[in-house]
């Protein structure tokens, strides 16, 4: 009998097919994450990059024509495929999504134009895009500049651009001043008025009446000043010709920013891009949040997360120290540990429900009865606010901190502890001076993870105090400076609100992507931070063993 | 020789402050630690505390009684502040009784000169008294309660506004029973008279003349004699606020239902609430609040409710929807609440407060006096009972959540207008008469549906990836695979939800066949490729190092995906051709095809989209835990298996996987827990309609999304508020149960490894 002869490597191990199947699982999983991040990155970045302005002449009689107008012009916002079902399969029609702008003239700022419907296209070199305070962008060709002092400058003139930018600098200065008066100074007077009104019996005293009169006088003075600035802002116009032929004057006071996308050099484009990002991060939102920036949302998220960390850190660490260092290890601690672990898996909305019932209605209601009864029935703490939101999220993230702190404490080698005790240190001294410093990176990891979770969580916040547009920030220069009772804006809720509650979803979409990119960047940076700290920690213990 | 020191050297002494600090910190940490652990459990207790009132029995207790003018009374009632009760006697004299001091104020109803009241009817909702006279005239009298505030105290006054008398039916004959109802400028009236020994029923349409300064005089526009159509002589007529029907109780046990269309009244139904074989005889019937349901009771106290609903082939007629236990001792009086679907039945010695929607007896008790009748306070905060000794007893009712019960939340309920008992969630409606529908079942089904589709997508993918990463991949890759998966886990769900709704949903809608092909093609192509690859000679196979397969498979997957994507429309044009409803032309459109072939809806924001995106949230969780438990299997197992000649696949499947199975199960459980509670993705990526099917192309409403949608609008401590807390409790319990199970399994596994 002849045995089969095997050459090295000629055997075929059983089940290699299965290995390939499992490798598909990992590939798809990784691809999904990277594709999602890429999708958001590309869409988020695109928002700020200047896009060309196109002038399209439509084929007469085509479906894209509206109101017999053959000329369409605007910013190419994106292109998409539209599928038209037919018997032989779906026909694909490519369409431009054009931001025609000039909502005040056209009544809509976005249109879909089928590419096949275009008879001819051109990219007018002089096309101007004007970002305005109201009605979105204006798009057209510049005609002239009517300055506040009555001079008129035609668009072809050499110093047109210089004069325009000078005028805009002036406008910006005025607007800033106006904002300062309206928001800051009048806000301060309002604040004082409210305090006066809520002080029991104060308004009945002569002193109170006098104060009220003084405040009223101050208010009137400021209001007059604001009116003067407003009138000044209404002077001067930038006249443009729309692609449909009509000429329109745009008050300079309305102009936020102008650019000529079709004649920008790459350098100018980069500058525009950076300027866009800066404005997005630092400005207040306008036009029902679809224009302007997200500064209040960033600030609100930041303050809320900070408050949450302040609340969660001591309690989480305390509980972990108790469980790991003090409690007798037995069925009780074991079941407590299991429950805490579980609590990390309880849906976030349940914490929101608890926050609403316990913090807002129960605790807040009681605080109002005790300390703010003058303001009732208008609730002060008895309604959603940043404090309640922070506490709710703190409760939600406390298991994360407990679990990771416990793990960090457990990772501190027993010998370290025993060495300290043997040298005569007390238990607390050992924990405080030896164990905690050694476990600090692990505790930090937990805290950072908790912060990442808190910054991205939306569902519970919707119940306990987040709003789509908060008139004031939770921290400002008015006594008592930190207003824990105020409602606030939040990046995650901003995305939800813009994407789903916005009246103009086309206009909101770029803002949603940009905000999403910002939030993802924040969360990813926090998580990477946590991961890096953990890796360091591992290496430290890997080498630093006794 | 020196004596040993009788005290320890100084260097052994511990500073008193150190000991003090240590003790203090020990106490502090203990208190702090225990209190945080307790606080965590307080969540459960607090939520429970919020939902308990839903299931509490109402408190009904007598808190006062007054002697009032003697009866018999044709009608009685009280204003909404419970300050001024009124009694109408059989002669048409109205007596107002001030509750706080017993002051009495009498007033005769403004009847036409020389006429007597012979019949009356009281409508508590609008506080109208309908009066019929001995001369065949009908008028309606509005009790006008007004509250004025003087020095912070409320004073309620009342007067009456009467309409001019209208002539309905035969003039000169006494009205034996009367009713008139309707809102706005249109009313309907009905009178029963005795004309020469024959009982007649005349209905009349009454309308108000429009004038420039508001409503003018009422006049009868049409009279319809219904006597001929009656099966038996009439005894009582019942009209409703919509003024669209006349119900007639006959001398026997029948009820006849006439429906108004335009100016005509047509007999649409004759029914017997208590069939003859039951031995019960219909005593009386009255509408419930909302005029859609009829409460019927027999002389012996049997009590059923008939409601209007569409019956196949018969249209919208009355059918029996509810049966209550009989009231012992029989029923002598009925009163309805004008706030909800509660009603009061009184017998000679017993009173019963019942709630129609949930078919529940809220309160029933013997009373220590003989009863004449009773009524329910307009705010559903009191029940008033009048005994035969003319004492009026006020029973304070504390029943904030009459519409809730175990059955309302978890059982089928036959709501008004519905053709059958149903599980339904619809918490708010337009009208006052709306019955809140608070069944948790559609929400539970929706939660399970979303979870199911998410798990179908994520479990296979996550487990394959975990198996590969832990068993086959080169160990170097673990260092970056796990952080990437952790980042995936940390993606805020609002982002996933937004992408699901605004990016994925429109894509899926257009390309269902492509997606279906994709789901098939990816695994199929990798299996086929794997099989083929293994047939290659070693000289070729050695070019792909073991542990690097997942990189080399990427181009293959890309090709397969591209092919599936492009083939989708082809498949669609071959198999999914439907008829375009507007043009009648056949078109290849899966969406239309699905609707026309299965009859099920196709929504853009559907379960497929939710499943795919929620998979995103669940995959990293399952992956991480499963990968951990697979990696933690002692390496000796693996070495032994490989040494015995098993291939790496055989080792993984036959040795590692069974050993780690508990851990994998716990990974799936924890993933399930996450999917159950996920809020933002389902909130954004579905239409949030509470439906009860598992159609993959329709949406759902989950418990969590329901809370997010409704709780911000729910008034504090209302039934809806507490019902939403109940939903939160269910979520809490579901996830807590599943997570505990997972945790115990994991613990068990850890012990097992320790033993090895």
Image (cartoon, helix red, strand yellow):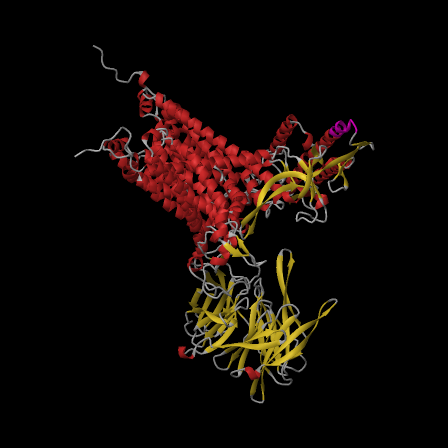
Question: Quadrant location of residue B212?
Answer: bottom right
In the image as oriented, which residue stretches furthest toward the right? A150
Q: Nearer the viewer, residue B296 or B117?
A: B296
Q: Position of residue B435 (x, y in %)?
A: 51, 61
Q: Nearer the viewer, residue B287 or B255?
A: B255
Look at the image and tell me in which quarter the C terminus of chain B lies: top left
On the image, the x and y values in percent for residue B141 come to: 63, 72
Q: Main secondary structure of the magenta part?
A: helix
Q: Is residue A218 left or right of residue B257?
A: right
Residue in front for this viewpoint, A324 or B755: B755
Q: Quadrant of the N terminus of chain B?
A: top left
Q: Nearer the viewer, residue A383 or B241?
A: B241
Q: Is residue B562 left or right of residue B77?
A: left
Q: Residue at x 60, y 40 (%)?
A: A79
Task: Verify whether residue A158 appears in magenta.
Answer: yes
Find residue B308 and report its horizontal and vertical position in percent.
Answer: 51, 69
The stretch in magenta equals A157-166
In the rendered image, the vertical position of residue A536 relative to residue B184, given as above or below? above
- In the rendered structure, the answer to whether residue A164 lies left or right of residue A94 reads right
Residue B61 seen in the figure: yes
Q: Residue lying furthest front in this view?
A: A1
Q: At which x and y percent is residue B375?
A: 52, 68
Q: Residue at x 72, y 46 (%)?
A: A69
Residue A382 in which image quadrant:
top right
Side of A443 where B230 appears, left or right:
right
Query: Does the magenta run of residues contain B273?
Result: no
B715 relative to B20, above or below: below
Query: Where B402 sits versus A55, above or below?
Result: below
The residue positioned farthest toward the top in the image shown: B1
């Amino acid at each position: 009998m002849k045995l089969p002869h095997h050459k090295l490597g000629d055997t075929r191990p059983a089940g290699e097919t299965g290995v390939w199947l499992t490798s598909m699982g990992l590939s798809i999983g990784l691809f999904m994450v990277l594709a999602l991040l890429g999708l958001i990155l590309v869409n988020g970045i695109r928002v700020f990059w200047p896009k060309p302005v196109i002038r399209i002449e439509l084929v007469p009689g085509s479906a894209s024509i509206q109101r017999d107008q053959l000329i369409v012009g605007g910013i190419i916002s994106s292109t998409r495929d539209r599928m038209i079902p037919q018997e032989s399969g779906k026909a694909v029609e490519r369409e431009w999504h054009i931001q025609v702008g000039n909502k005040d003239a056209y009544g809509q700022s976005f249109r879909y134009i089928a590419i096949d419907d275009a008879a001819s296209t051109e990219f007018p070199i002089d096309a101007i895009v004007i970002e305005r305070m109201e009605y979105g962008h204006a798009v057209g060709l510049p005609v002239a500049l009517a300055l506040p002092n009555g001079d008129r400058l035609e668009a072809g003139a050499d110093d047109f651009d210089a004069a325009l930018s000078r005028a805009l600098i002036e406008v910006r200065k005025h607007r800033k001043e106006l904002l300062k008066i309206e928001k800051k100074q009048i806000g301060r007077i309002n604040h004082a008025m409210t305090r006066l009104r809520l002080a029991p019996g104060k308004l009945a005293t002569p002193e109170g009446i006098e104060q009220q009169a003084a405040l009223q006088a101050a208010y009137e003075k400021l209001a007059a000043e604001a009116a003067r600035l407003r009138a000044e802002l209404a002077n001067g116009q930038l006249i443009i010709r729309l692609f449909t032929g009509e000429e329109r004057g745009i008050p300079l006071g309305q102009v936020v920013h102008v650019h000529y996308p079709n004649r920008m050099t790459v350098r100018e484009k980069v500058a525009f891009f950076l300027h866009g990002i800066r404005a997005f991060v630092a400005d207040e939102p306008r036009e029902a949040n679809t224009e302007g920036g997200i500064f209040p949302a960033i600030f609100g998220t930041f303050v809320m997360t900070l408050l949450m960390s302040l609340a969660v850190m001591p309690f989480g660490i305390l509980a972990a120290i108790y469980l790991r260092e003090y409690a007798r290890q037995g069925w009780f601690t074991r079941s407590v540990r299991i429950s805490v672990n579980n609590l990390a898996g309880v849906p976030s909305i349940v914490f929101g429900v608890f926050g609403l019932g316990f913090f807002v209605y129960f605790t807040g209601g009681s605080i109002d009865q005790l300390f703010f009864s003058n303001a009732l029935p208008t609730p002060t703490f008895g309604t959603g606010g940043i404090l309640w939101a922070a506490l709710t999220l703190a409760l939600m993230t406390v298991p994360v901190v407990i679990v990771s702190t416990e793990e960090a404490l457990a990772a501190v080698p027993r010998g370290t502890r025993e060495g300290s005790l043997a040298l005569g240190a007390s238990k607390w001294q050992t924990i405080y001076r030896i164990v905690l410093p050694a476990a600090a990176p692990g505790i930090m990891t937990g805290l950072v993870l908790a912060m990442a979770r808190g910054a991205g969580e939306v569902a519970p916040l919707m119940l306990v105090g987040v709003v789509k547009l908060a008139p004031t920030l939770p921290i400002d220069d008015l006594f008592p400076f930190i207003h824990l009772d105020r409602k606030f804006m939040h990046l995650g809720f901003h995305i939800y609100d813009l994407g789903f509650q916005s009246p103009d979803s086309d206009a909101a979409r770029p803002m949603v992507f940009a905000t999403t990119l910002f939030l993802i960047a924040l969360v990813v940076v926090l998580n990477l931070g946590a991961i890096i700290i953990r890796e360091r920690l591992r290496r430290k213990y890997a080498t630093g063993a006794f | 020789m020196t004596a040993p020191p009788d005290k320890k050297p100084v260097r052994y002494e511990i500073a008193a402050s150190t000991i003090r600090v240590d003790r203090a910190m020990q106490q502090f940490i203990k208190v702090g630690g225990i209190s945080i652990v307790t606080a965590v459990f307080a969540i459960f207790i607090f939520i429970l505390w919020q939902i308990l009132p839903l299931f509490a029995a109402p408190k009904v207790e007598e808190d006062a009684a007054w002697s009032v003018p003697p009866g018999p009374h044709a009608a009685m009632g009280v204003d909404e502040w419970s300050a001024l009760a009124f009694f109408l006697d059989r002669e048409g004299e109205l007596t107002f009784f001030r509750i706080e001091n017993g002051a009495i104020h009498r007033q005769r109803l403004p009847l036409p000169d020389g006429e007597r009241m012979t019949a009356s009817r009281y409508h508590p909702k609008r506080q109208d008294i309908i009066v019929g006279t001995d001369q065949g005239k009908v008028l309606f009298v509005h009790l006008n309660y007004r509250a004025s505030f003087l020095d912070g105290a409320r004073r309620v006054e009342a007067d009456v506004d009467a309409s001019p008398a209208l002539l309905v039916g035969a003039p000169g004959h006494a009205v034996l029973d009367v009713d008139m109802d309707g809102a706005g400028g249109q009313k309907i009236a009905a009178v029963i008279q005795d004309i020469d020994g024959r009982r007649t029923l005349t209905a009349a349409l009454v309308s108000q003349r429009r004038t420039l300064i508001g409503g003018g005089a009422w006049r009868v526009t049409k009279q319809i004699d219904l006597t001929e159509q009656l099966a038996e002589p009439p005894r009582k007529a019942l009209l409703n606020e919509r003024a669209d029907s006349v119900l007639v109780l006959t001398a026997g046990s029948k009820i006849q239902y006439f429906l108004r269309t335009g100016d005509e009244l047509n007999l649409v139904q004759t029914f017997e609430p208590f069939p003859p074989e039951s031995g019960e005889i219909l005593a009386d019937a009255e509408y419930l609040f909302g005029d859609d349901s009829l409460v019927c009771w027999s002389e012996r106290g049997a009590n059923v409710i008939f409601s209007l609903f569409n019956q196949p082939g018969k249209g919208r007629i009355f059918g029996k929807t509810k049966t209550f236990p009989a009231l012992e001792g029989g029923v002598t009086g009925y009163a309805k609440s004008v706030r909800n679907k509660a009603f009061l039945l009184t017998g000679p010695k017993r009173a019963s407060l019942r709630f129609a929607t949930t078919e529940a007896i809220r309160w029933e008790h013997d009373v220590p006096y003989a009863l004449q009748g009773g009524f329910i306070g307009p705010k559903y905060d009191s029940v008033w009972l009048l005994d035969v000794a003319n004492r009026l007893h006020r029973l304070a009712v504390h029943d904030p959540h009459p519409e809730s019960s175990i059955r309302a939340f978890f059982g089928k309920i036959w709501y008004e207008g519905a053709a059958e008992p149903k599980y339904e969630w619809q918490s708010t409606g337009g009208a006052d008469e709306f019955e809140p529908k608070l069944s948790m079942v559609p929400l539970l089904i929706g939660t399970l549906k979303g979870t199911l589709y998410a798990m179908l997508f994520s479990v296979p993918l996550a487990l394959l990836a975990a198996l590969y990463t832990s068993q086959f991949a080169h160990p170097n890759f673990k260092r970056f695979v796990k952080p990437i998966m952790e980042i995936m886990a940390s993606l805020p769900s609002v982002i996933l939800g937004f992408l699901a709704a605004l990016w994925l949903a429109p894509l899926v809608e257009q390309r269902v066949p492509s997606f279906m092909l994709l789901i098939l093609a990816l695994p199929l192509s990798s299996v086929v490729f794997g099989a083929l690859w293994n047939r290659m000679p070693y000289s070729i196979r050695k070019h792909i190092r073991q542990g690097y397969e997942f990189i080399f498979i990427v181009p293959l997957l890309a090709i397969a995906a591209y092919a599936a994507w492009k083939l989708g429309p082809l498949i669609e044009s071959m198999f999914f051709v439907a008829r375009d409803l507007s043009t009648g032309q056949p078109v290849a459109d899966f969406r239309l095809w699905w609707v026309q072939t299965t009859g099920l809806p196709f929504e853009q924001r559907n379960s497929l989209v939710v499943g795919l995106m929620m998979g995103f949230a669940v995959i990293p969780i399952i992956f991480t835990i499963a990968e951990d438990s697979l990696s933690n299997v002692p390496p000796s197992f693996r070495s032994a298996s490989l040494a015995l000649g098993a291939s790496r696949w055989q080792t993984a499947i036959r040795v590692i996987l069974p050993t780690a199975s508990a851990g994998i199960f716990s990974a799936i459980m924890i993933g399930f827990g996450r999917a159950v509670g996920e809020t933002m993705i389902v909130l954004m990526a579905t239409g949030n309609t509470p439906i009860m099917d598992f159609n993959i192309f329709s949406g759902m409403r989950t418990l969590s999304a329901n809370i997010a949608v409704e709780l911000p609008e729910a008034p504090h401590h209302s039934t809806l508020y507490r019902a939403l807390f109940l939903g939160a409790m269910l979520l809490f319990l579901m996830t807590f149960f599943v997570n505990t199970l997972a945790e115990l399994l994991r613990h068990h596994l850890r012990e097992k490894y320790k033993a090895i």
